[in-house]
Image (spheres, rainbow, N blue to C red):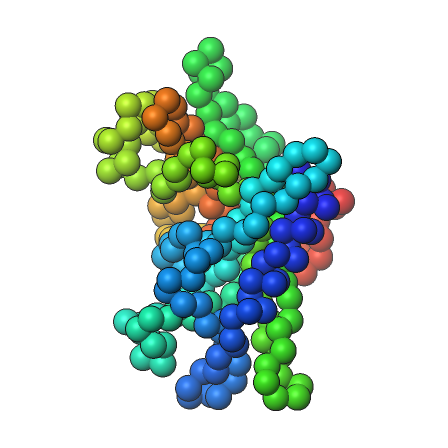
Amino acid sequence: MNEEVFEAGRNRMVDLLSRCRVVRDQQTTLLYAHRIPRDHPQLIGRGKSSLVFELPPIDFDGERYHLAGKGFKYCETSIYKGVPEDELHLVGCKVGFGDDWGLEENIYWLRQMNLKWLDEMDLGVDIPEARQYDQNFLGRQVGEVKHTNFTIMPDLREGGCYRVEEAEDSLFDRLSNGRDLRRVRDFTCRRILSESERLGLTILPDETHGDDEEVLPALEHMFLVQYRDWGEKSSLGDLNHLLISRKRQMGVKPDYLE
């Protein structure tokens, strides 16, 4: 996808967050999150640690692109009493990454692995492009700044053509092709583990999706399923909660990403 499309998506996400008031931590009185109404019209998904927003479509070079913006770490009243019941507070921090190139590194290494399975059946997983950005948002008092990270990625619903859910056994049981999709997920996880060992990579999940000793839950959580009445497919569309990396100096962009 053209970088200009991603930049347009970034601007749309900045506009969305700019219209959501920045709120304070009750104990420290510091700016810590964006106030997101639970019924926000562009809020289309909630994960364990993320909020996903539909962004206005982008027309570029004769094509229409549907993008989504994702922010990480949110609080709600059940876990933080400073949040009203009708709100979610989006912290917008990094998840699973050691520095600014974690998402780019994940995509790079996954594309170095042969993740296609049974080509004659066209079974495998897509690895959509995505970009991580950051932005400063001003508070109401002079000098106050809220630093927020977010990710821009394709909206896998593709303008309403598909429904999208996490790849879980309950979904596989409902779909006509669910058995094959489950086999693709399991095969792909095994291939990522074996290829990571071959390439000298480590897989580091964030604290909400596993640990260094048991990375399989984090790998399984990457999978999203796009489905409609006449077909389904899998995508590695949730790549922000772990880091697939070769040992390197954090804070310095790896040579292979240049």
Residue drawn at the location 34% of the way across and 26% of the way down: 229
Is 91 placed above or below 167 here?
below
Horizontal placement of 255 versus 182: left or right? right
Question: Relative to residue 87, is residue 145 depicted above or below?
Answer: below
* Whether residue 122 is situated above or below residue 166 in the rendered picture: above
Which residue is drawn at the image coordinates 31% and 79% (left, top)? 81
Q: As displayed, is residue 211 above or below residue 170?
A: below
215 left or right of 255? Answer: left
Residue 70 location (% of width, % of height): 51, 55
**Residue closest to the eye, 131 or 140:** 140
- Tell me if I can see residue 224 in this picture: yes
How far across and down, in percent of the image, does residue 99 sit?
A: 62, 59
Residue 197 in sight: no
Quadrant including the N terminus: top right
Quadrant the C terminus occupies:
top right
Is residue 149 found left or right of 188 in the rendered image? right
x 46%, y 72%: residue = 35
Q: How many numbered discs?
A: 0
**Residue 190 in picture, x, y percent from top left:** 41, 32
Residue at far top of view: 120
Q: Give x and y (percent) for residue 178.
A: 30, 27
Task: Name which residue lies at 42% across and 52% down.
Answer: 44
